[in-house]
Image (spheres, rainbow, N blue to C red):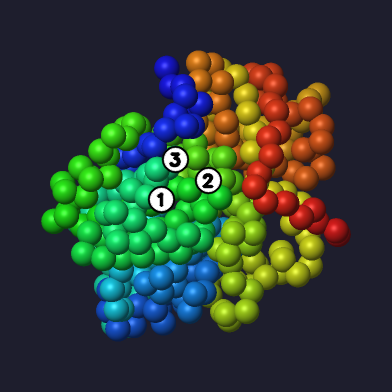
Amino acid sequence: MRQFAALSDATVVSTLDDSLGLLAINGIDSAKFLQGQITCNLQDITPQQSRLGAHCTHKGRMVASFRLLQNAEHSYLFVLPKTTLAALQKSLAKYIVFSKAKLSDASGDYVLRGISGTQAQQRVAEVFGAAPNASNAQHSNENGSVICINAQTPRYLCVIPQASAAAVDSALSASAQIADSHYWHWLDIRDGIGSVHAETTEEFIPQMLNLQLQEGISFTKGCYTGQEIVARMQYRGILKKAMYRIAGSGTAPAPNTAVFQDGHTQAVGHIVCAENIADENWEALAVINHDAIAQKIALENLSALTVLPLPYDIPVATA
């Protein structure tokens, strides 16, 4: 059974290839094409800066959420759950026909590692030549690209080309605890970073996953697929739900599991992602109605839920 709390004072390297994949886009029209398809602003994405973002349907529902980085001129990588990679590629392919850009599954070309804990910053600096010291900041060298996910409690996402993988993996892992992807995804939950999974494709609009609070939505860059709906939700103040961090007992629920207010039969929310963290305890991110969050909430099996703090404040709709 996992005991994640025992790793809190250690340097931990998490292997992520089982759960995360990489979708590449290459070509001189890549930036122009993506600017019209995703929520974040391509002008903010450079070899020194990554961004969270989403690709939506024309109704503003997220097909996939991701972290986007630039790995070369006219070349970008989406890092996202493997369960939504094919859906993202298929959806983007519908629009790319007349652009000088090409999509490809690049998961096999790289190794993905997460490093967190007491010596993470020092270890990253040793391997990659520098350690970015602000959230979303990126640094690259011949060993790959490293992105700072959280500057306050340092953790880094490492995107390593296969040619460098063995040496870099060995250097990162020296004297570190090794964990699987579940530990890294628990750290995402703690940091309030949600992801669309296969079970929740086209279920949420970007603000429901708090992307506007994490530089994942640009409201000034102009049109993109679904932009009208996303903007309307923002400026008319009609978003009645957001993503909250919760905890419960038993087995961690699957994405899209319903959340109920005590004594009611209609769902007031749904699980985004969840991880068992110790014995019979789990933590999750869930999209929940604002007016239900102060009430008693539970899963359908009557398992009571506790609301936990997030590292950012959630604004409540005013209309």
Tell me: 66 left or right of 194. Answer: left
Tell me: 8 left or right of 12. Answer: right
Using the image as rendered, state which of residue 10 and residue 238 is in the foreground: 10
* Residue 16, above or below 297: below
Q: Secondary structure at mark 1?
A: helix
Tell me: 313 left or right of 295. Answer: left
Q: Determine crowd level at label 2: few under 14, some 14-19, many 20+ residues with C-alpha closer than 10 A.
A: few
Mark 2 vs 3: CB contact within 8 A:
no
Amino acid at the residue labelled 3: Thr
Residue at 57% in and 40% down: 190
Q: Position of residue 235 (x, y in %)?
A: 75, 70
Q: Secondary structure at mark 3?
A: loop
Quickly name the residue at label 3: 118
The CA span between labels 1 and 2 is 10 Å
* Residue 279, above or below 54: above
Q: Determine crowd level at label 1: few under 14, some 14-19, many 20+ residues with C-alpha closer than 10 A.
A: many
Amino acid at the residue labelled 2: Thr
The CA span between labels 1 and 3 is 8 Å
Q: Is residue 90 visible?
A: no
Quickly name the residue at label 2: 153
Residue at 37% in and 50% down: 122
Q: Position of residue 228 (x, y in %)?
A: 64, 73
Residue at 82% in and 32% down: 295
Amino acid at the residue labelled 1: Gln
Quickly name the residue at label 1: 121
Q: Position of residue 69 (x, y in %)?
A: 38, 65
Looking at the figure, which quarter contains the N terminus? top left
